[in-house]
Amino acid sequence: MRITGGRLRGRRLASFKGLEIRPTSDRVREAIFDLIGHHLTGEKVLDLFAGTGSLGIEALSRGAAWALFIDHSPKAIDLIVRNLKLCGLEAQGVALRKDLLKGFPRRHRLIEEKMDLVFVDPPYRKGMILPVLEELSDLRILGSPATLVAQSEQKEVLPPRVRDLYLAKSRVYGETRITLYRHEGQE
């Protein structure tokens, strides 16, 4: 697994051994950033169900200022911290252990920031994407504008609107569907 763009292009990231997680492939990650299509300079990034941290780290490589990585697994958190160190990004990323199946962290100082780019990549077949999108909208942590990237199983088609999130693009890459939402709401 490698960074596909930005100043760290080609840098290898550590990954899990075994089938504990489903990391986003280099090909899909590159397609995601092509779909996003804008410069990330100075943006704040939230990477939910972060796994290896590859999406948030890719955003940092492409110019984002700061990233918060959230995952429930202690192994994932350790791996994210390791990958941040491998890339020299320790000062730009924070890994937070939280089980999003049990709710979103409402009272955490790191969530007070308005996020410009959010990645949501929950386990497939758990029915989690819509509740997470609704929760993100309700928490009012999205900047205006903001981009939200949801990964789901290819068969799962998401609605054109989720509260104040509006569908911008949806593409299928193998078994993965990438859905981009835009947030233009009030801050």
Image (tube, helix red, strand yellow):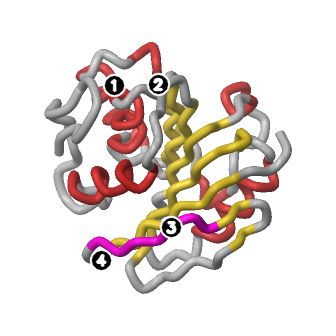
The region drawn magenta spans 167-173
The three-letter amino acid code for the residue at tag 1 is Leu
Q: Is residue 11 above or below residue 36?
A: above
Outermost residue on the bottom side: it is 155
Mark 2 or mark 3, earlier in chain: 2
The three-letter amino acid code for the residue at tag 3 is Lys
Q: Of helix, strand and loop, which one carries label 2?
A: strand
Residue at 64% x, 45% y is 146
Q: Nearer the viewer, mark 4 or mark 2?
A: 4
Mark 2 or mark 1, earlier in chain: 1
What residue does disc 2 label?
A: 93
Q: Quadrant of the N terminus?
A: top left
Disc 2 + disc 1, Cβ < 8 Å: yes
What residue does disc 3 label?
A: 169
Q: Residues within 10 Å of mark 1 (few under 14, many from 20)?
A: many
What residue does disc 4 label?
A: 175
Residue at 52% x, 75% y is 126
How far, Cα to Cα, is label 2 from label 1? Answer: 7 Å
Outermost residue on the front side: it is 38
How far, Cα to Cα, is label 4 from label 2? Answer: 29 Å
